[in-house]
Image: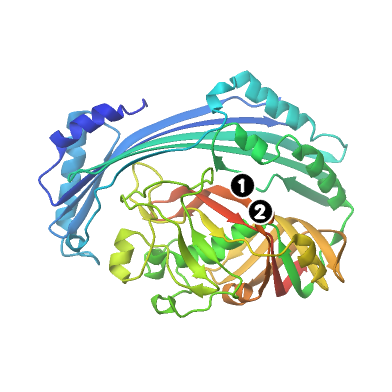
Amino acid sequence: MSEIDMDHLESLFGDITPAVDFCSLRAVTTRETHLSVKRDVCDPLHQSIDSGVMITVVHGGGLGYGATCDLSREGLKRAAAKAVEFAAQTAGRSVVDFEQITFPAPIGEYCSAEERPWEDVSLTDKYDYLRKACARLKNDDRIVDWGTSVTRTIRDTLYLTNHGGRLRQEFRFTAPSMSVTANCGADTQTRSLGGLQANCHQGGMEVFKACNFKRAPHRLTEEVIALLGAENCPTGTMDLLLAPDQMMLQIHESIGHPLEIDRILGDERNYAGTSFVTPEMFGTFQYGSELLNVTFDPTIPHEMATYAFDDDGLEAKKEFLIRDGLLVRGLGGLTSQHRSGLEGVANSRASNWNRPPVDRMANLNLEPGDQTIPEMIEQTERGVLMRTNVSWSIDDSRNKFQFGCEFGEKIVNGKIVGIVKNPNYRGISKTFWQNLAGVGKAETVGVFGTPYCGKAEPNQCVFVGHASPTCRFTNVEVFGGE
């Protein structure tokens, strides 16, 4: 499939726009390149390209979509006619009277910043860089699997409305990854660079430097071998320190998903689940301790889900979702704000041209505090510091959870006394966040993300970013694995 000629598409929009209350065109071209080296062998290059258009129509109170990869004048007209047909069918039959919603007419542009463009480095040099890093992972006979990879995604979008809106947004994503697995007898351990493509950022080749890709093999191989000889994680109620690459998932699952307003309204209960949060909680519910400050911030350069406008044309701004532990705002876009009467954010996002936008996380960050990591360790009489997610489980209301990590360090009387393997913990979202007892300073913050956040029917996977400092929690149920 070829790329979209955005200028030509823009010239056609006026010709194919039906006579309706509101019409928008959202065009998306996505190009992806994946390079990997496994056990010192370079895998074949994988590349893909996908292009198409979504036409949205609001008329007579109804809403309809028509998606197509036929970008001819006739193809676009058929998609527009289908959207008009669906809008007529939904008029008076939806939970929303779309005629009551004022859709914006945004004008603007956005482009990911790249300090060292991806294209400036040859394919040969990229493979060589991955191969050299991969070779440094195999430095012990107990290492049985190892590999490096990078996924590069380029997404260009155009958004037009029949009342003058025009947006161009160009996204450049780079996601390096690294993993090493060691075995001794019945024990197998793995260490990775932050987890599955967790070091994903907007940018170019500088992303490798940001995640210390060149230095990582030495650290990861040392840690994975140390895990083989480590004692199992202790079991009991104790303090828990979480590094940013685990805080990422904790924020994602027990704050991000529960605060999606469409989920709170019940839209996702047949698939992705509901939420323990109810509309009445906003403005009154103490979600966590006074140390908990969580922001929706799609304005930070290089974080994974930075953008200027969402897919309904709302301008993206930083907003506090939780301030001093109090729940103040939800993750709801234009339609959800209208339905619920709650304050929301610019987070109506679609995974591709053939999916409608729904409420999604973007950059969901825990704001830094005033403690150093040594200070938090000193305050811990008995506990474990855990790094890098390896497993997760959470109920369909995003309330009860259980997470496992790759690497743990045991703390006794304010000192780290050794490495522990198979560290796990469980809790209930409200209780867990209300036990937040320490938040690291800005220098402890790590920026991570995921390209695999799934939701909606048909399924949509979107890119999400999370920044967090190291944090300390009290009275957490910690346990070891087998």
For residue 337, the mark is none
| On-image quarter of the N terminus | top left
Name the N-terminal-most of marks 2 and 1. Answer: 1
The answer to whether residue 38 is left or right of residue 199 is right
Number of callouts in the render? 2
**Residue 480 appears in view:** no
* Front-lying residue, 147 or 384: 384
* Front-lying residue, 420 or 467: 467
Q: Is residue 304 above or below residue 62?
A: above
Residue that protrudes farthest toward the front in the picture: 370
Q: Which residue is mark 1?
A: 198
| On-image quarter of the C terminus | bottom right
Q: Position of residue 415 (x, y in %)?
A: 87, 65
Residue that protrudes farthest toward the left in the picture: 19
- Residue at screen point 54% across, 75% down: 287
Q: Which residue is mark 2?
A: 245
Q: Position of residue 265 (x, y in %)?
A: 37, 70
* Front-lying residue, 289 or 53: 289
For disc 2, the neighbor class at 10 Å (few under 14, some 14 to 19, many from 20) is: many
**Residue 19 appears in view:** yes
Which residue type carries mark 1? Ala
Q: Marks 2 and 1, Cα distance to the nearest angstrom?
A: 8 Å
The answer to whether the residues at label 2 and label 1 have Cβ atoms under 8 Å apart is yes
